Image (cartoon, helix red, strand yellow):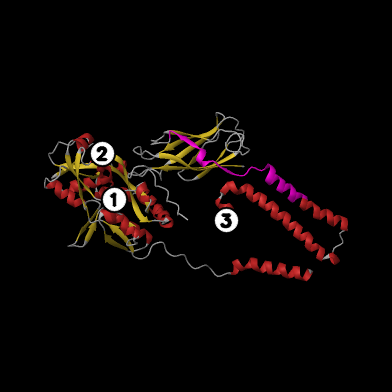
Amino acid sequence: MGILLLTMGAKGAEISQTLSLVVGVAGCLITIYFQKAEATTLSLQPGLKWTLSAVPVVILAAAASWWFLIHKPDRNITDLVAVHNGHEMRDMDEARIALPAASGDVGAVNSGRDMLALRLRLVNPATVGNCVSPATLTVTPTVDGKHGMTITTTSDAEIHLSLAGAERQAGARVVVDLADPGCAVNLTVTEAVLYN
Amino acid sequence: MIRVRRGAALIAFLLLLVPACAPDPPPAQPLFGNPIYIGVTTDHPGWSTFEPGPNRRTGFDIALAEWLGNRLGRDVAFLDLTLAERIEALKSSQVQMVISTFSMTDERRKEIDFAGPYMVTRQGVLVREGDERIRTHADLIGGDRNVCVARGTTSEEQLRPHDGKGLTLTVETALKDCLRRLVDGQVDAFSTDQLVLRGFARSTPATRVVEGLTFGAEEQYGIGLPDQSRQQCDLLTRHLRTFLNEGYWGDFLERELQPENPVAHKPLKLDPCENATP
């Protein structure tokens, strides 16, 4: 389970936190349960013991309610992302990544998730040229027409963009920096996950 | 119960001490054996040649291989390869690395790893001295010329689309065979990396490099390594940085090739090594 969460990177942080809370509460309950076996050495009043037992149960119930009723699970939107001008990109060419704009669970707008984990891949369609490995990508998120913080990355590396407050449109601008001006590469999105 | 807790605490404390008292881990396996088997070609003047009589190897790639062996504290054992055998030699573990005007390409990275680049050049054209028919790229690909390339090279890849359209491609196993065909008048031109052609032109005065005619993607020479060689790649990249920045690169280039503009062939930065696939 831990290894699975590690492989998910930041996308697994929320699950880790929730899991930690559950394990912590379960630990409290077990402790209280075993305290009963040591009744001879403890001097807690029966009423206080019931209160102590009830607190973790309430916390657990609140966590479960949050997880099942309020929490938004990670949403993989890779297949819904569109890449414009990402074909045969030359040095310093710019492509635009458009996230699905539909409100609700299938869109990046008003979805209840503020972050996007994005993995971009460059593909050299030619059989010659050392294009992909030395290339860098400059990614700038755009939320309702406003530019966010620019991140520089490489092909196949995961980045995290903030989409907080998106109400109408969310996406990103990507500029490729190719070391060899003779190169032409295609830009694809291999993973796009909305998360909190 | 208190006694049990004390016992548990003592056991936990002792368990924490175990790593500190454990014997030192065994030394890590060396990244390269001794000797290091390095694949090279034998017929590239200025880059990698072998004279059986005096049993002597010369050229930039040979000098780099020996310099690396020295830096790594290993003897070097050379294994002769043709250009087309380079990838297979790495995949079959016949050699631990290939240093042989080996162009780093995204296509080749699917099968092997590279450390580098340590040289940058482009495709060029060699013709017979006095032959002025090929001056531009259009003359080369649209003039119905017979052009020789070596099999398994990026030169073949870049001219193959024009074969049968504006030129006729003659494919040979070794570059020296292309040179022979050119000198004998069997082909009109011989195309490969321009820096390699400069070596041939120096050794064969009846030929010349067409000045100003370069084409295709940059050819960036790297050290070929078997796939999943991240640690070896990192180590060689560190040494190549020294090689490039502390004067060795310039000295070897001047000694072996003497190009007109050496700076144009010096890589601006080294590529990151590929991550090992889990």
Tell me residue B82's x, y (percent). Answer: 25, 56
Residue A31 position (above or below residue A89): below
> Where is residue B23, by image quadrant?
bottom right
Looking at the rendered structure, the kind of residue marked 2 is: Thr
Tell me residue A150's x, y (percent). Answer: 52, 36
Look at mark 2 in the image and give the residue it sits on. Answer: B214
Tell me residue A184's x, y (percent). Answer: 37, 38
Look at mark 3 in the image and give the residue it sits on. Answer: A3
Tell me if mark 2 has few (under 14), some (14-19) or many (20+) residues whose alpha carbon lies within 10 angstroms of its own: some
Residue plotted at (79% across, 51% down): A55
| Res. B166 in view | yes
Residue closest to the eye, B247 or B238: B238
Tell me residue A13's x, y (percent). Answer: 62, 48
Residue B39 lies left or right of residue A135; in this view the side is: left
Q: How many marks?
A: 3
The lab-note entry on whether marks 1 and 3 share a chain reads no
Q: Earlier in the sequence, mark 2 or mark 1?
A: 1
Q: Bounds of the magenta span?
A: A58-85
